[in-house]
Amino acid sequence: MSNLCDVGVDPRRWYPACRTDELGPGRTREVRFLGRSFVVFRDGHGAVHCLDNACVHRRVALHEGEVRDCRIVCPYHGWEFGPDGALSRIPYWEPEKALPRLRVRSFPVVERSGLVWFVPEPVDPLPPQPPDTSPWDGGEWFSFRQDRIFPNHYGIGLLNGMDYTHFHLHRRYQPWSRLTLRDLTAGDERVFGAYEVTSGRGRAERVLRLLLGSDAGADTVTHPLEVYYDYPHHHAHLGDGMVVWVFFRPEERDRVTVYITLYIRARRGTRHLRQFAEPFFRRLVLARIQEQDAWIGVREQIAWESRPDEPRCELNPVSAAAERLLRSRWQAYVEEADPRPGQWPAVRLGGPARHSASPLGAGRPDDGA
Ligand code: FES
Ligand SMILES: [Fe+2]
């Protein structure tokens, strides 16, 4: 399988369904994963549940129904399903007759790191718990949430996030002038790259030095940059002052939702300043970098779909190792799965996309110049 866009992800892992604060009591949400539809809902007692998003009666989607106590009610004939998916009530059923024993498939859910997580294909035992970001929540850390739907394949998004050599695309925001790979380890579940970054006196470089509390008098400063692909998610740590967690939910062949939280350590004396600066930093830097990544992601998708078998000359060993891991985990799943998973549906190149007026979207995003 040479086309990266043909590669799926192992559904026997935890994936983010939504942020916890996007699912208030009595609320439902549709969650898509690998072309399938799930519903998550929070019941009246605050607990979250996840079911297949199809009523057993006539397969109408349940997320457009309502939550009643701890049950979800189908919007069509009003059949009610409990947290485990069991049919618990039919409004017009004769009381003296036993209810048929019917069930919507249910999935494990957990709330952790400010997200609702689910396992789209449960296994026994369940996979290890999703990552815990609580050490960075609150206290001396500022957090910037920057979630986004990218109109490209999961692998394109993952490799973009892992690849710190693509700063040409973000050159206006490049916070270092040298990036040196010091170490790389690749295992069955993790790729770890250890870089050293050197910042000089460029504009973005000075901002980074300020954020990391570096020696303001030195001409250049270096910081360790550690990059992890902990299948199927990603995190990176820059010096002792910056951490980014990136959680993926692959939805369709050309669509991935990414939950990103960037943490920056608040140094003494800068706390007030940073709280004030946070919305500007988010809008003027993070959002623009994301625009550029979304812009190039569509273009890389087209490059894969139109030239699937032509070789790629990946010279960054971290990216190459991450792609090998991504492909090998999917291969292992395909060999173990019963029945064998199907293919992603094809994407029509150049035709009307499902998610935007044109698959190429607008022109190159403004880099603030
Ligand atoms: S389709 Fe759901 S109750 Fe009839
Ligand atoms: Fe990027």
Image: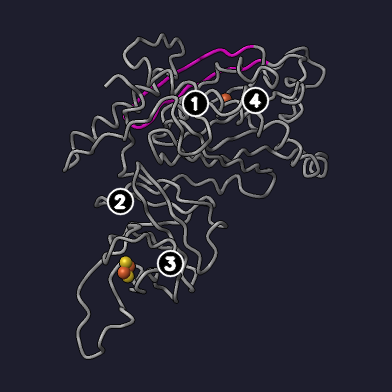
Residue beneath disc 4:
365
What amino acid does circle 1 point to?
A: Val
Disc 3 crowd rating (10 Å Cα; few below 14, some 14-19, many 20+) is some
Q: CA distance from mark 1 to mark 2?
A: 34 Å
Residue beneath disc 1:
298
Q: Main secondary structure of the magenta part?
A: strand
Which tag is nearer the camera, tag 1 or tag 2? Answer: 1
Q: Which sits in the foreground, 10 or 96?
A: 96
SS at badge 1: helix
Residue beneath disc 2:
126
Most extreme residue toward the front is 351
Quadrant in which the N terminus appears: top left
Q: x, y percentage for residue 274?
A: 78, 40
Q: Is mark 3 within 8 Å of ligand 1?
A: yes
Q: x, y percentage for residue 320?
A: 40, 17
Q: Is mark 2 within 8 Å of ligand 1?
A: no
Residue beneath disc 3:
65
Q: CA distance from mark 1 to mark 4?
A: 13 Å
> Which residue is rendered at x = 55% and y = 16% of the image?
165
> Which residue is rendered at x = 38% and y = 23% of the image?
323
Disc 2 crowd rating (10 Å Cα; few below 14, some 14-19, many 20+) is few
Q: CA distance from mark 4 to mark 3?
A: 39 Å
